[in-house]
């Protein structure tokens, strides 16, 4: 395996007016590893993800993919990743199989080939073939999330981003989704980056964890070290304490 990280962030800054959301983020995500980024609401997790995807442009700093600037060939970069969105972000007017096969169809696969791949990926996330012809509105929240996961892996991406993957799900379904994500990332050998505030997701998905607060990575390390990190930010977040360096928004 190459020593060059799959994703590197070097001094990434992003402000909105006088509000400094990212204030010099440094982070490496090695190829084939699952990095989970945690932090409270408004700490910049989503902004960081949008900067990596190129949806937002950082004010300063560098974002590298395999050692190369992420924005150098945006189309080539976008073709290499899959994404599970927080709200599912399924197309209401398209049947499930077309949602899953959306990229494949736009890349020129025939409808028959794309549908076959979609049904295979639906089965991989625990959904039966007959779900393929339903519409998103006919599915439960947990099923919609599985369809979103099937879509994220349909094109066999090298990098998969997960944005709050268990939001809106009950604890049992959250556990199912977490297990699926972990299994699929390992099977594919993909590099994964997840943003979440759900500690059950962190423990289920992560190889490594990064804690963001005040626009910077306050602590990063392997999942097995979070209980003994010795970092006051991580310790307060992990145990949900009101007292500590993270001020509760009232």
Image (tube, rainbow, N blue to C red):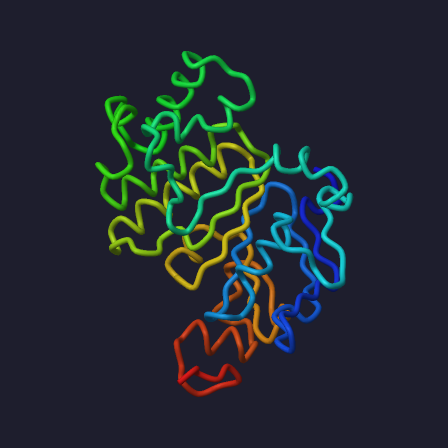
* 69 left or right, relative to 247: right
Q: In the displayed structure, would residue 48 be above or below residue 17?
A: above
Q: Residue at x 26, y 56 (%)?
A: 171
Q: Quadrant of residue 76?
A: top right
Q: In the displayed structure, would residue 122 be above or below residue 235?
A: above
Q: Residue at x 68, y 71 (%)?
A: 23
Image quadrant in which the N terminus is located: top right
So how many labels did they put on this image? 0
Q: Nearer the viewer, residue 109 or 155?
A: 109
Q: Residue at x 34, y 28 (%)?
A: 122
Q: In the displayed structure, would residue 131 be above or below residue 232?
A: above
| Residue 65 pos. (x, y %) | 71, 44
* 20 left or right, relative to 122: right
Q: Quadrant of residue 232?
A: bottom right
Image quadrant in which the C terminus is located: bottom left
Q: Nearer the viewer, residue 63 or 6?
A: 63
| Residue 34 pos. (x, y %) | 54, 48
| Residue 27 pos. (x, y %) | 67, 59
Q: Quadrant of residue 137?
A: top left
Q: In the displayed structure, would residue 197 be above or below residue 231?
A: above
Q: Residue at x 47, y 71 (%)?
A: 40
| Residue 208 pos. (x, y %) | 56, 56
């Amino acid at each position: 395996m190459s020593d060059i990280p799959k994703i590197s962030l070097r001094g990434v800054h992003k402000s909105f007016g006088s509000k400094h959301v990212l204030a010099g983020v440094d982070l490496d995500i090695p190829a084939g590893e699952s990095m989970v980024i945690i932090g409270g609401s408004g700490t910049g997790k989503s902004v960081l993800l949008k900067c990596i995807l190129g949806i937002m442009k950082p004010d300063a700093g560098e974002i590298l993919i395999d050692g190369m600037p992420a924005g150098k060939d945006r189309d080539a970069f976008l073709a290499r990743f899959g994404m599970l969105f927080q709200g599912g972000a399924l197309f209401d007017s398209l049947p499930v199989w077309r949602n899953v096969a959306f990229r494949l169809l736009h890349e020129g696969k025939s409808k028959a080939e794309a549908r076959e791949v979609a049904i295979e990926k639906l089965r991989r996330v625990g959904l039966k073939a007959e779900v393929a012809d339903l519409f998103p509105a006919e599915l439960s929240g947990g099923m919609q999330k599985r369809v979103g996961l099937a879509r994220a892996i349909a094109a066999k991406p090298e990098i998969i981003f997960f944005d709050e993957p268990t939001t809106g799900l009950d604890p049992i379904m959250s556990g199912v989704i977490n297990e699926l994500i972990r299994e699929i990332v390992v099977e594919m050998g993909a590099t994964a980056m997840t943003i979440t505030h759900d500690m059950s997701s962190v423990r289920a998905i992560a190889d490594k964890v990064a804690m963001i607060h005040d626009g910077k990575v306050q602590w990063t390390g392997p999942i097995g070290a979070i209980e003994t990190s010795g970092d006051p930010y991580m310790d307060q977040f992990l145990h949900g304490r009101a007292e500590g360096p993270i001020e509760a928004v009232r």
